[in-house]
Amino acid sequence: MTTPDGASDVKIHVQDLAVAYSDGTESLQGITMDIYAHQINVLFGPSGGGKSTMLRTLNRLNDQADVAAQSGQILLDGENILARDYDVTQLRRRLGIVFARPVPLPMSIYENVIYGLRLAGVKDPATLDAAVERALKQAVLWDEIADRLGDNAYALSGGQQQRLCLARSLALQPEVIMLDEPTSGLDPISTFKVERTLQDLKQDYTILIVPHSVQQAARIADWAAFFLQGQLIEWGPGRQVFTAPKNKRTEEYITGRFG
Ligand SMILES: Nc1ncnc2c1ncn2[C@@H]1O[C@H](COP(=O)(O)OP(=O)(O)OP(=O)(O)O)[C@@H](O)[C@H]1O
Ligand SMILES: [Mg+2]
């Protein structure tokens, strides 16, 4: 499957997805959309709209949460990941997730990057060294910290910690990187570095991101989906959604009239 303009492949197809928590909150209702390969796919909208729920559902993290009802399909390369017998461990290797607040592990920079590989049983030092260098370069952190890989990760700045957490995901060579407000709390320069990193990463990965602001969404979106109170109000090419939205509520939100 390709985009309407034939430019890119569909990596994930979401069909009629509905998620309700056991307290009755319908966090997602009838969501149908595509996530395109090698594009920056953006989910945006006001607080409580269902953006994080969407990411968690894609990674099957809601399996452990307080979810009462879930219906619809999520097809990853055509296969329904919500199927009961789908291999969730394998899924989480293919779909890496990076959360808002970077949480390095209390160990060295080096050990942080290879944490997942060690869990997966990788022991060969040359393989691990190569993985560290590759992941840190992809996260655009290598040049800043190459000479102090043995330092404790807590010694890094907030922006560096965020890119370290990104590198930790990249080390596992996922196919899709999901990021939930990865630059909230970062200064403008660190934010810019993370945004530039994403532009490089989309050559190799599919990116799905919840930006921390409308401005950031407009800057980075190849494709944009506007979520409001559990519904997908509008979804389309970023340029169209942010300059000529089709829905009045999208327009009101991006022009700052609500939210
Ligand atoms: N574990 C949970 N139990 C019950 N309700 C939940 C749970 N997690 C989320 N919700 C509800 O689901 C709705 C969507 O929440 P979600 O976190 O997906 O929104 P969001 O778009 O990510 O918002 P924000 O921009 O504030 O991060 C909200 O009404 C929220 O209160
Ligand atoms: Mg959220």
Image (cartoon, rainbow, N blue to C red):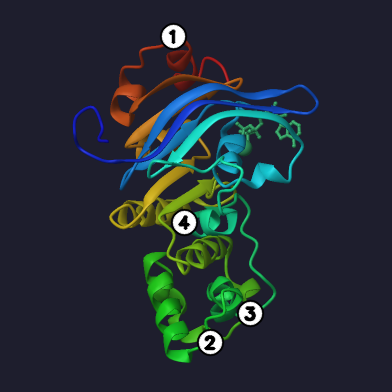
| Secondary structure type for disc 2 | loop
Per the rendering, the mark at residue 123 is 2
Tell me the distance, in whole angstroms, between the alpha carbons under discs 3 and 1.
49 Å
Mark 2 or 1, closer to the camera: 2
Tell me the crowding category of disc 2: few under 14, some 14 to 19, or many 20 or more residues within 10 angstroms, Cα based.
few
x then y, percent, for residue 96: 51, 56
Tell me the distance, in whole angstroms, between the alpha carbons under discs 2 and 1.
55 Å
> Which residue, given by chain and number where applicable, does mark 1 sit on?
248
Q: Which residue lies furthest to the right in this view?
A: 23
Q: Label 1 sits on what residue type?
A: Lys
Please report whichever mark, 3 or 1, sits nearer to the chain's N-terminal start: 3
Mark 4 or 1, closer to the camera: 4
Please report whichever mark, 4 or 1, sits nearer to the chain's N-terminal start: 4
Mark 3 or 2, closer to the camera: 2
Ligand 2 is within 8 Å of the C-beta of the residue at disc 2? no
Q: Label 2 sits on what residue type?
A: Lys
Tell me the crowding category of disc 1: few under 14, some 14 to 19, or many 20 or more residues within 10 angstroms, Cα based.
few
| Secondary structure type for disc 3 | loop
Q: Label 4 sits on what residue type?
A: Arg
x then y, percent, for residue 209: 47, 43
> Which residue, given by chain and number where applicable, does mark 4 sit on?
94
Mark 3 and mark 2 in contact? Answer it, CB < 8 Å.
Answer: no
Tell me the distance, in whole angstroms, between the alpha carbons under discs 3 and 4.
28 Å
Quarter holding ligand 2: top right
Classify 197 as above or below 49: below
